[in-house]
Image (spheres, helix red, strand yellow):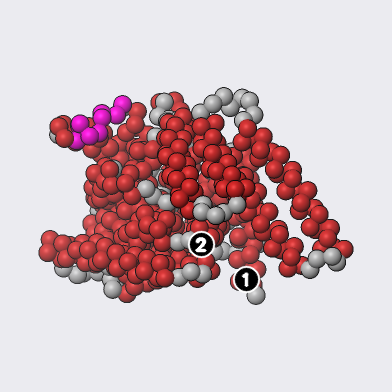
Amino acid sequence: MEGIVDTVVLVGIAVVGAALARRLGFVAPLVLLVAGLGLSFVPGVPEVHLEPELVLVGILPPLLYVAALQTSVPAFRLAIRPILLLAVGLVVVSAFAVGLVVHAVLPEVPFAACVALGAIVAPPDAVSATAIARRIGLPRRVVTILEGESLLNDATALVLVRISVAALLGSAVGFAEIGAAVLRNVGGGLLIGFAAAVLVAWLLRHISDPLLDDAVSLLTPFVVVIVAEELHTSSVVAVVVTGLYLGHRIPYLLSPTSRLQMDAVWRLLIFLLEGVVFLLVGLQLRTLVTGLETDLATTVQLTALVFGTLVAVRFVWVYPATYLARLVPSIRRREPRPPLSVPAVIGWAGMRGVVTLGAALTLPNTPDVADSYPRDLFVFVAFAVIVLTLLIHGTTLPALSRRLGVREDTSTEDALAEAAVQHAASRAAREALEEQAGDAPASVVDRLRALTEGRSNVAWERLGDQSQETPSAAYGRLRREMIRAERRVFKEARNSGRIPEEVLVRAQRELDLEESQLNRSDD
């Protein structure tokens, strides 16, 4: 019972923190992290021990899966070169750079352990990158690059951690062994992810019940991770591949009801997971501080050096990766040279997250290696890097992008493109109506024709003067008042016993769906 109460309290704090963040205009992960840091030292708050399996198998899969589902595959494909340079190249370089720095400060620690710490702190976080980049209005290509990096860099980092830990435990690690490990992890992850995506797509095509669709969708990332882990391949690659494949094909796999319902289910689950995960990270502070056996001076020095190395290496990598590639004529023609401010923003968007802490907690603590490296110090440094990057980079990135002018307002272009496509869609709809009308009543045909014309008009209205109320806005305002009046009558009829509860529920659902559609049209 006590565990259930603690879980409810934790979720409740996360919900209140997220609501407060929205009201204050802050990013929820930052507010919840600070709340967790403060609560970790409040008397009476129990210590929370974050298990690595919970992070890497319970929390990470759905977060990565939904991020992949929402990623545009065409945009991802066009940005694959910078994404791989960051997700693979930068992670490897950062891991070895941090390893060299740590080994210089602690020469008695095996270099393999130092590289393991470097790999742990190297990958930026998917949740914080997406939340902040989208909120501050960065250019779409920049957002795609940051999202793509955060989707794939965990796989690179976790493979490096496994190889480094194997070397620390005394296993022979040469080029052949490293190549085999990479092939097994990445190649195996690709195969498992693709096979799982094909299987799930087949299931979704043959399921007509929205509840079963939701159940399959919820189970998918966890099953993929479990299978990938059992086969000792990269579960991150497997989940991301599955999510990208299914996300691109969902319009063809699910019914409209299933898509709407699944979207609502995933939005709620991710909202709760994101809130709880950053709160949990903050709550680790007391446990990590009390368990720290290294002296304060060494701890502060190593933390500062690791943080500074990560920031410096990211900038040193991003600028050449951005401009040297454009010396190739084909790349230069396809990708115009961006201003210096764009790689500056990408370089500063290196917030770390829960994967870093989860990977740090997997560091071995067995008797044969316990005295060879300071595990408590390494875990604390990983935690400190998360806090520093989120608080420093996360709070200053909006101001930096605003100062450098790295913003993109595509509302007009989007509205124009939508209006053009909607015009073509409306024409196709009218043609289908004329072909299928047959002996349908003229009133029905006229109503459908007016509905189609209304959709087209709404799309064009978005290009007009927004200071005056448009016909569609007036329609929405008046129709909401009408729906409220209808809803009130149905409730009174239920209360007086004129209709049963089932009739109210059915009518309420129809009215809710219509009002929800009106609200979506306003967004």
Q: Position of residue 356 (x, y in %)?
A: 39, 55
Q: Kindly check if marks 2 and 1 are in contact, taking CB atoms under 8 A apart as contact.
A: no
In the shown orientation, is residue 246 left or right of residue 14? left
Extreme residue in the front direction: 439
Q: Which residue is mark 1?
A: 4
Q: Position of residue 43 (x, y in %)?
A: 65, 59
**Secondary element type, mark 2:** helix
Q: Which residue is mark 2?
A: 258
Q: Can residue 397 be spotted in the picture?
A: no
Residue ID at (16%, 35%):
330
Question: Is 143 on the left-hand or right-hand side of 8?
Answer: left
The span picked out in magenta is 331-339
Rendered location of residue 309, percent (x, y): 31, 42
Q: Position of residue 161 (x, y in %)?
A: 29, 60
| Residue 423 occupies quadrant | top left
Residue drawn at point x = 24 percent, y = 44 percent: 81
Quarter of the image that includes the C terminus: top right
- Which three-letter amino acid code belongs to the residue tagged 2? Ser
Foreground disc of the pair 2, 1: 2
Would residue 352 appear left or right of 37 to someone viewing this image? left
| Location of residue 362 by image quarter | bottom left
Amino acid carrying mark 1 in the image: Ile
Front residue of this view, candidates 320 and 477: 477
Q: Secondary structure at mark 1?
A: helix
Return the mark for residue 167: none
Q: Is residue 100 left or right of residue 287?
A: left
For disc 2, the neighbor class at 10 Å (few under 14, some 14 to 19, many from 20) is many
**Res. 144 visible in picture:** yes
